[in-house]
Image: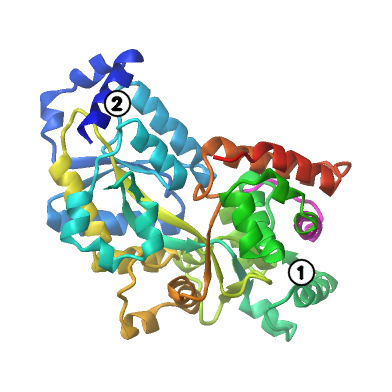
Amino acid sequence: MKSRRRVFTAWLVCIGAFPGLMGLDAAHAQSQSLDVLHWWTSASERRAADQLSALLVPAGVQWNDAAIPGGGGMAAVKVLKSRVLMGDPPDVAQLIGSTLTEWADVGLVLPLNAVAARQKWQQALFPTVLSLVSYKGEVIAAPLGIHRINSLLYNRHLFTRLELSPPRTWSEFENVARKFSAAGIKPLAWSDEAWQIATVFESLLLAEAGPALYQQMIVQRKSTAWMDPRVEKALLRLRWLRSLSEMPVEQVWTASARELMTDSAAMMIMGDWASGELMAWGANPNTDFACVVVPGTAHMHLYSVDTLAMLVNARHHEALQEKMAETISAMPAQLAYNRIKGSVPVRRDLGASTLAALSGCARDSWETFASPNAARVPSLAHRMAADEATKDAVAQTLWRFLTDPRMEAQEAQKRLASVIRTP
């Protein structure tokens, strides 16, 4: 790791940022607080972050919050780059998936091998999670929670009013959508924000293509796989889902979740962080809402994993950073954080009583992820399987397809194939 630090230092010198690092105030360098950059700004996300902050106090670590609002974390990533270029990287940053390894490559990330060894992460964490935070023989981030992207949330009151059951197949989905439309109720909460379109599409892609072809397209990035007829079916279904909203608009995901809570919409396709938001607003998963998997994705887990990376900077807070990593990966923080966030712990050593205390959505998510027979596939829309540029290009291509009715599905397939390249 020393060689990586030398690379990082040389890189900063080249961009003229090194003097800024060396000029940091000495008193600031001795501070017992850690500057944490993240994009958890909704009600549930804020509460989950506050819970972590409270749990760090007994460990002697103060959480200095540097939250950056913006759906999908795009704004936070830009702020992080800006701070690095100015010579003032935060102590901790929410870095996930491929962006995490990119920062590790330039020597910005502090290794956590000692923490992982002390806490026996090899035995305690899911292998998929440990692999995600490992790079070139080093552990490079502390994992927090596992989100399930292929989640279909539904309003219990509206389904009960129309005497409907939650859809398990697409034919059932089409049937309940027709009945809600006839009753004057919006079947599906929708947003034309590009990252939300991509979030819905990857679940449809998994449903139509299955995990094997999905892996070829998303993980292996085989351009030819994108021309499969099943991709066309997913695109056409995406267009149909959008048509269920009479006047599609771009709105933040919390606005769509609010429609679900206020009985304005019957269903919503979104990662399970939406369930955390509903609970933060006072909704009860036993009486007000529930979730099933997106039709066609039973026994599949389309995942995104929250992780915090400890960054190298001139403040030299390595001891505090290790304390933070130990605290947030231990069982108390795992349970407290994920209960609020809507996600599930990254640990595979949950007992039966702990599982029983989870909501139905969370319990099914954890059990599916833990099952040796389930397909665990990484999200492209949430940085698990693609770099920032590829993720954005795919999202923009899907946005253009939906907002331009003249574009044929096969043309969208060609464009998607062109932006997906073998890594």
In the image, 206 versus 354, the foreground residue is 206
Image quadrant where residue 25 sits: top left
Q: Dot 1 corresponds to which residue?
A: 185
Per the image, label 1 sits on a secondary structure element best described as: loop
| 119 vs 79: above or below | below
Q: Amino acid at mark 2?
A: Phe
Q: Dot 2 corresponds to which residue?
A: 8
Q: Residues within 10 Å of mark 1 (few under 14, many from 20)?
A: some
Circles 2 and 1: CB distance less than 8 Å?
A: no
Per the image, label 2 sits on a secondary structure element best described as: helix
In percent of the image, x 63 and y 66: which residue is there?
260
Q: Amino acid at mark 1?
A: Ile
The image position of residue 15, as x and y in percent, is 36, 15
Q: Residues within 10 Å of mark 2 (few under 14, many from 20)?
A: many
Image quadrant where residue 90 sits: top left
Instruction: State which mark lies toward you, 2 or 1.
Output: 2
Residue 382's disc is none
